[in-house]
Image (cartoon, rainbow, N blue to C red):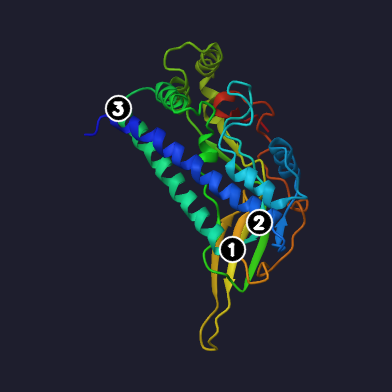
């Protein structure tokens, strides 16, 4: 079996390669922004996208420069340990018309992202027997040794969405934020809390373990983990209209646009026909779920676990 130290040595050059790829794509988009030829764009401005633009110190008035800054932002915007949600990523949905050269740079960047993500996964796998906290600490040490102590792994991993061939049309639609609620056991919660603090050094985690141990048997069936997707997603799909009368049209889901989707432009620098949507989804008219019996405050904040209350 490959030694974990050998796997650790593969990570820094891949991270450096990833940054170079992001820099190349950023430069190409800056050139499009300043080119005499107009390149079509369609960026949406929901509140979370406006916040992202402010964080990047960029403007929607220069959409290609804004996208360039977003693709190149591979570090945490806030210092580590500042209290910011480590899972959060900067998100700006929309479409950009680009030439084939820019698409190729984006494909190359995606290859670098996948190689880096695989190297991190293999390194973690080599340390599988060790506690999760130790694995996380080792990864951060490798990133710091490579010169990127604030590397944001989620932003390093997420791929740039592409339309690999120019479609006749694009459809856009908002997918609203969702909530998932699942029943969990005392044993599951205890195991997860121990993984978060294997040495018992975190007083917050230890306090939550004490709370868990004090749950009476009559309430142990009422533990629920609540996961909320806090932001709506812009769903993008390509539609290929067949040139042959007897053939059916092709429909392909591109994915959720957390970053602008790069689309092959025509000779005039224009996007294919596409649907327009509001800058944020309309308010839901659906009835509220009957799970409002769940407490407002989490019982185990570290796990997003709540206690269901009697109706």
Report which residue position mark 1 lands on.
99
Which of the marked residues, 3 or 1, is nearer the chain's N terminus? 3
Q: Which mark is residue 32?
A: 2
Secondary structure at numbered mark 2? helix
Whole-number angstrom distance, CA of label 3 to CA of label 1: 42 Å
Image position of 272 with respect to 218: above or below: below
* Quadrant that contains the C terminus: top right
Q: Quadrant of the N terminus?
A: top left
Q: Earlier in the sequence, mark 1 or mark 2?
A: 2
Q: Say above or below: 193 vs 292.
A: above
Q: Residues within 10 Å of mark 3 (few under 14, many from 20)?
A: few
The image quarter in which residue 252 lies = bottom right
Label whose residue precedes the other's in the sequence (3 or 2) = 3
Task: Evaluate whether residue 176 shows in this view.
Answer: no
Q: How many C-alpha atoms fall within 10 Å of the one at disc 2: few (<14), some, or many (≥20)?
A: many
Task: Give me the disc on residue 5.
Answer: 3
Q: Separation of disc 1 and disc 2 at Cα?
A: 9 Å
Mark 1 Cα shell of 10 Å, populated few (<14), some (14-19), many (≥20): some
């Amino acid at each position: 079996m490959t030694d974990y130290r050998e796997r650790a040595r593969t990570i820094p050059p891949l991270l450096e390669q990833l940054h170079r790829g992001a820099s190349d794509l950023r430069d190409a988009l800056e050139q499009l922004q300043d080119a005499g030829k107009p390149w079509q764009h369609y960026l949406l401005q929901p509140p979370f996208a406006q916040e992202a633009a402010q964080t990047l110190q960029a403007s929607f008035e220069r959409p290609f420069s804004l996208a360039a800054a977003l693709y190149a932002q591979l570090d945490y915007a806030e210092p580590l340990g500042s209290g910011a949600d480590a899972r959060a990523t900067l998100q700006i949905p929309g479409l950009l018309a680009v030439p084939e050269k820019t698409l190729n740079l984006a494909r190359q960047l995606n290859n670098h992202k996948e190689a880096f993500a695989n190297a991190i996964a293999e390194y973690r796998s080599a340390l599988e027997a060790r506690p999760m906290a130790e694995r996380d600490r080792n990864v951060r040490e490798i990133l710091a040794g490579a010169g990127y102590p604030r590397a944001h792994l989620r932003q390093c991993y997420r791929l740039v969405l592409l339309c690999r061939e120019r479609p006749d049309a694009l459809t856009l639609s908002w997918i609203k934020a969702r909530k998932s609620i699942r029943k969990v056991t005392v044993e599951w919660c205890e195991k997860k809390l121990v993984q978060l603090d294997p040495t018992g050094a975190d007083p917050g985690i230890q306090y939550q373990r004490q709370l868990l141990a004090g749950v009476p048997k009559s309430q142990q069936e009422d533990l629920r983990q609540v996961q909320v997707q806090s932001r709506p997603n812009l769903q993008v799909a390509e539609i290929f209209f067949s040139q042959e009368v007897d053939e059916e049209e092709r429909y392909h889901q591109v994915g959720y646009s957390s970053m602008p989707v790069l689309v092959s432009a025509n000779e005039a620098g224009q996007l294919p026909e596409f649907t327009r949507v509001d800058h944020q989804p309309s308010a839901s008219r659906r009835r509220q779920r009957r799970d409002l019996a769940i407490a407002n405050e989490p019982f185990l904040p570290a796990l997003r676990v709540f206690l269901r209350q009697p109706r």
